[in-house]
Amino acid sequence: MGNGAAGEIQKTGRVRRGRCFTPARRIARERRGATLIEFALVMAPFFVLLFGLLEIGLVFWGGLELENATEDAARMVRTGQAQAGGFDETRMKQEICGRVSLLVRCSAKLRIDVRNFNRFSEMTPPVPLDANGALKDSFAYSPGGPQQAVLMTAFYEWPLLHLLSTISLGNMASGNRLLRASTVFRNEPFPES
């Protein structure tokens, strides 16, 4: 061995094996960029989780808004105000959309179905999706007369962000979420016009 190797044995107590491994060992021991690399590894799942939670919260909030607005608009049918005012499907959509703030393009995307029955036992809920899994364009609008049982249902197609294709809140063929709000009631004995 040369003087250089002997001097190194005395200083460190071990022999340097070769210069080709030295840069790799030096990089492996380096800690200055470790935090940046760890953050880069954790960042993507963190943001997917964050935006997923935000989307779930917005869908839940939109569903609650639709339920409350449908219930409020149904009072107009129950008391006979809608029948006396000559409300049609478009006017009832305006009543519901006027009570929501989160449902984007509400009047274009909202579908309502209002059906009357003689007894509650005769009620059947509407089927909102066609054979292809898309929201139907037309539904029944028949608010009924005094003391008739009424089923009022509102549908809204909520667009999703689709952050992960394997985890989806979608329940439609388009991958979007169908929000549904229904209320069942008996009309009051209002005077017929």
Image (cartoon, rainbow, N blue to C red):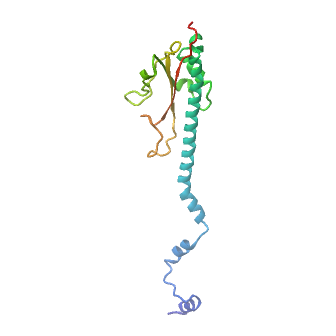
Q: Is residue 15 above or below residue 90?
A: below
The front one of 187 and 182 is 187
Q: Position of residue 3 (x, y in %)?
A: 55, 93
The front one of 108 and 179 is 179
Left or right: residue 35 versus residue 19 is right
Residue at image location 54% in from the left, 49% down from the top: 49
Q: Is residue 1 visible?
A: yes
Q: Is residue 7 above or below residue 116?
A: below
Residue at image location 42% in from the left, 28% down from the top: 129
- Quarter of the image with the C terminus is top right
Q: Is residue 165 above or below residue 73?
A: below
Residue at image location 51% in from the left, 73% down from the top: 24
Q: Position of residue 115 (x, y in %)?
A: 47, 19
Left or right: residue 112 versus residue 173 is right
Q: Position of residue 124 (x, y in %)?
A: 42, 24
Q: Which residue is most to the top? A: 193
The front one of 119 and 41 is 119
Q: Is residue 138 visible?
A: no
The front one of 11 and 67 is 67
User: How many numbered marks have been drawn onto this rendered protein structure?
Assistant: 0
Q: Position of residue 28 (x, y in %)?
A: 54, 72
Residue at image location 62% in from the left, 30% down from the top: 101
